[in-house]
Amino acid sequence: MRTTLALAAAVALAVGPAATAWADTDVPDEPGEEGPDYPRGGEPPEGSEVVFEFQDERISESSGIAPSLLHEGVWWTHNDSGLHEPHVYAVDEDGETLATLTLNAELRDWEAVTVAEGPDGEPQIHVGDIGDNFGGGWPDIRVYRFPEPETLADATVDPTTLTLAYEDGGRDAESMMVDPRDGRLYIASKEFSGGLYAAPEELDAEGENTLERIDSAPLFATDGAFHPDGTRYVIRTYWGATVYDSTDGVPGDPLGSFDLPEMEQGESIAFTPDGTALMAGSEGEHSPVWRVPLAEEFLSEEDAELADGDGAGDGSSPDEADAEDDGDGGSALLPIAGGAVVAGLLIAAVVWLARRS
């Protein structure tokens, strides 16, 4: 993961001003279609702030975060691949570890965690062993599911292993989310032309479950999460986040995108329990977790009322940039085109080198 990020940084430096011009353009979902203006890094919404830092030295590559459904103010996280134990950690609002769950499961490349009601209606923790540093070398991926403990204490857990495979071949992914309305699981692949994949409505714990591509996904997605009521979901990248309206179902419609705070390696995202803000985290020792308020256009009516009452959701709109004078559009075509060509070549090199690393 760190190799890929370092290579991506090299690309950014190499492209320079031309890439900046390209970053101001839309990235369509499919050729010929309009899409959201995916961010490339910059200023986060107004009011963004660090809520806590992980205090546990064992949490050095936090790659996912999710709020507890049973314990107020508690967040679940885990490490990425590497020399880590198969642990899931419960941390409080000060970043202190309250409990460590040891899973009797392989830690191949854990990339995401979410908490949602299971088939029995009780809260279940889902850990996504969905990463693939070989760019599709694994024939299948796994999701480990187990009941959220009612008491926060160190314990060993025997999870249910759910095996999944993509209908169109293996691929790398770091984004996993579960719709709280029907329990359906979704995964967004981490690629230049990423896709959003839906698992079967009912998962078979005994056999292989096929992931069906239902839409495109932002460039190099690193995590995703559903709003507590399922009417919104978010997919983040290293640089920013895109929010979708899923009121009438998934994939829904993109509402817009915005930059996230600068981080060492932005990996995790989750909605706050009240749905008016996002929690965004990063890898690294004592890494910070940010609270990012959502602008009004990303909120449901109920969320907007909450935001009006407590001041949340005052983040700047991602559409503010549209108010800028576009009279120089013609003169910008050359650097944009040049930047797109250079960036495309360099990104292809990044992917090739990353797969060989």
Image (cartoon, grey):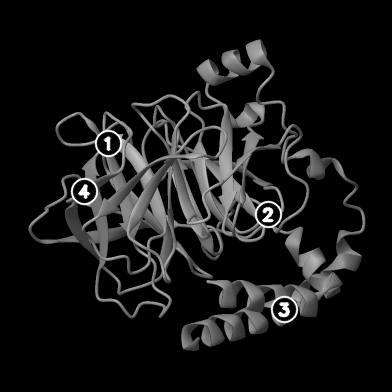
- Viewer-closest of 76 and 342: 76
* Disc 4 from disc 1: Cα separation: 10 Å
The numbered mark at residue 329 is none
Quarter holding residue 297: top right
Residue at position x 56%, y 63% in the image: 219
* Disc 1 from disc 3: Cα separation: 41 Å
* 347 over 298 or under it: above or below: below
Please say if the residues under marks 1 and 3 sit with CB atoms less than 8 Å apart.
Answer: no
- Viewer-closest of 22 and 90: 90
Residue 166 in sight in this render: no
Query: Mark 1 against mark 3, which lies toward the viewer?
Result: 1
Q: Which residue is mark 1?
A: 148
292 vs 128, left or right, is right
* Disc 2 from disc 1: Cα separation: 35 Å
Query: Mark 4 against mark 1, which lies toward the viewer?
Result: 4
Amino acid type indicated by mark 4: Val
